[in-house]
Amino acid sequence: MKKLTRTETAEFLAAHNNYIILTHARPDGDTIGSAAALCLGLRKLGKTAHVLENKEVSPRFRWLHQGLTTDAAADTDCVLSVDVASPGILQEAFKPLLGRIQLRIDHHSSATSFTDFELVDPISASCAEIVYDVLTLMNCPPDKDIAQAIYVGASTDTGCFRYANTTAHTFSTAAACAQAGAEIYRLNMELFETNTLARLRMQGWIVEHMKLIRGGAMCICPIPRQVELDMGVTGDDMDNISSFPRTVAGVCMAATLRQAENGDVKLSVRAIPGYDATQVTVPFGGGGHKGAAGATLKMPLEEAAQAVERVMLEQMP
């Protein structure tokens, strides 16, 4: 594996013509926005580029990939991944492509190398910012569609620029998106200011059932699958729900565990500066950032909650 700079990544992309772009499982705004922006930019430069269709993309973000997807990678395609920290978090249908992925663009500090080349910058608040930089170096300034995709990636990974990972570069990237025509107000309303009744009911359930530990400095909330079914919440309703318990006054680290349809437990951890979410997820084969990390546990929900709580208690500064 060879580490690339932004300039070297731009040169790599300029040297190839046919691209397939991969996103991660349980795709968020950053992996979806980064893939869309990179695909649109490569097409603008005369390249053939597609995003490999990720069937887990929710209606909330699906519009970003409209007209960009394909259902298969050709043998001659150059395969890229965006915002994928490790092979384990690739969408399951994409894993047969492991060994063919030539370039990874990412910003996770706990990233695992699995490609021929990689551009990984843990200083960047979002992968979308890195994509913006690379396209700029390729003399591909954002048009409105690219700008909207980059803005979605940058804003969702920073909690609308509220999280500690937000930098001056994040703001300058967002400003460039606004100058290029991104509909900032509409996007912010849809992404951050609108809740369904089902999501609000779920937040109320979390308040009633989360467990505070270490004198309220930490909390943990396992959510049984049946609760989600009974409330009728969708994937969009549950998007970033793990950030909600962290907003309780005094809570510095929060873990949310959700049961998937196949019985696996999806762990999401959120933490403020001074705490490291990855130290809770890495023992379970996961990763991410100090402020936000995740993992998948193949065990019953109650057992998973007990295991996570033990690890969390060990992480108290």
Image (cartoon, rainbow, N blue to C red):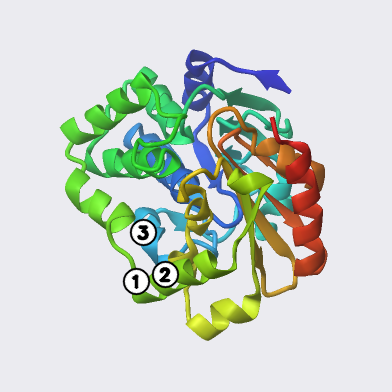
The secondary structure type at the circle numbered 1 is loop
- Position in image of residue 34 (x %, y %): 44, 40
Query: CA–CA distance between discs 2 and 1?
Result: 5 Å
Residue type at mark 1? Thr
Residue drawn at x 81%, y 42% is 283
Query: Which quadrant of the view contains residue 60?
Result: bottom left
Residue at 71% of width from left, 35% of height from top? 316
Residue 226 percent coordinates (x, y)? 63, 81
| Circle 3 residues within 10 Å: few <14, some 14–19, many ≥20 | few
Task: Answer yes or no: is residue 269 visible.
Answer: no
The residue indicated by pointer 3 is 66
Per the image, the residue denoted by label 1 is 196
Q: From this view, report whether residue 19 is shown above or below residue 113.
A: below
Badge 3 or badge 1: first in the primary sequence: 3
Horizontally, residue 95 falls left or right of residue 231, namely: right
Relative image position of residue 306 (x, y in whole percent): 79, 58
Q: Disc 2 designates what residue? A: 199
Task: Establish if 196 lies above or below 61.
Answer: below
Label 3 vs label 1, nearer the camera: 1
The x, y position of residue 274, in whole percent, is 59, 27
Q: Rounded to the nearest whole Å, what is the CA distance between mark 2 and mark 3? A: 26 Å
Closer mark to the observer between disc 2 and disc 3: 2
The kind of residue tagged 3 is Gln
